[in-house]
Image: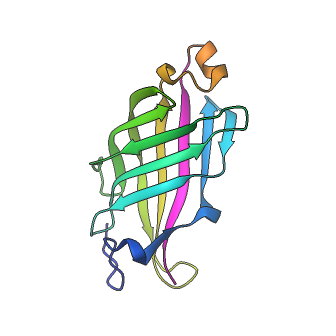
């Protein structure tokens, strides 16, 4: 991924997560089970701008008290520098499970403010060991968690 000459990807103060452009979706096949509109956490970028890892917490719908915590470190690139592959951990209360992570991290040139930003899409399976979401767990079919977000330069 090309490096942006006027902003260091390694400087956390130079970037912010664009909450207005972020959404988490939990689905079973093509059926949407839950939208997770909010999350908090961090993305870890390499100096050249590729995604090295993340630690994110998703508040679950009202009837669930716990947060879903999704983390991955030492992510590698798949067939191209824009592809993301690796192993992640998912924690829900006391339950901990591991699942592959895949996705893309693409630098978008000249965004709204004339500066490049990063668009990130991450995907993982929610292992049955988490016992969530209940509809997927009861059918013994894992659900998929997909996150869409952007990391934009501070103005």
What residue lies at 27% left-to-right and 69% top-to-bottom?
47
**154 is higher (above) or lower (below) than 94:** below
Q: Position of residue 144 (x, y in %)?
A: 54, 33
Q: How is the image coloured?
A: rainbow
For the stretch drawn in magenta, what is the main secondary structure? Answer: strand
Q: Is residue 62 above or below residue 74?
A: above
Residue 75 inside the magenta-drawn segment? no
Q: Position of residue 75 (x, y in %)?
A: 30, 48
15 and 145: which is toward the camera: 15
In the image shown, does 65 or 145 lie closer to the viewer?
Answer: 65
Residue 42: image x %, image y %?
43, 57
Where is the N terminus found, in terms of image quarters? bottom left
Question: Which quadrant holds residue 61?
Answer: top right
Q: Residue at x 44, y 34 (%)?
A: 90
The image position of residue 101, as x and y in percent, is: 39, 40
Taking the image as shown, residue 121 lies to the left or right of residue 46, namely right
Q: Which residues are drawn in magenta?
A: 141-155
State yes or no: residue 146 in magenta: yes
- Which sits in the foreground, 57 or 36? 57
Whether residue 56 sits left or right of residue 34 in the image: it is left
Using the rendered view, name the quadrant where residue 71 is placed.
Answer: top left
């Amino acid at each position: 991924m090309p490096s942006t000459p006027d902003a260091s990807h390694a400087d956390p103060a130079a970037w912010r997560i664009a909450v207005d452009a972020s959404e988490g979706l939990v689905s079973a096949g093509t059926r949407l089970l839950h939208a997770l509109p909010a999350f908090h956490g961090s993305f870890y970028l390499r100096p050249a701008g590729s995604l090295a890892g993340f630690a994110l917490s998703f508040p679950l719908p009202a009837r669930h008290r716990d947060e879903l915590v999704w983390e991955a470190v030492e992510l590698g690139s798949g067939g191209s520098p824009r592809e993301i592959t690796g192993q992640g951990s998912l924690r829900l209360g006391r339950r901990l499970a591991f699942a592959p992570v895949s996705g893309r991290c693409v630098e978008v040139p000249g965004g709204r403010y004339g500066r490049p930003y990063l668009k990130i899409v991450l995907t993982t399976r929610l292992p049955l060991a988490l016992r969530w979401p209940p509809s997927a767990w009861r059918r013994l079919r894992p659900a998929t968690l997909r996150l869409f977000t952007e990391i934009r330069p501070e103005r």
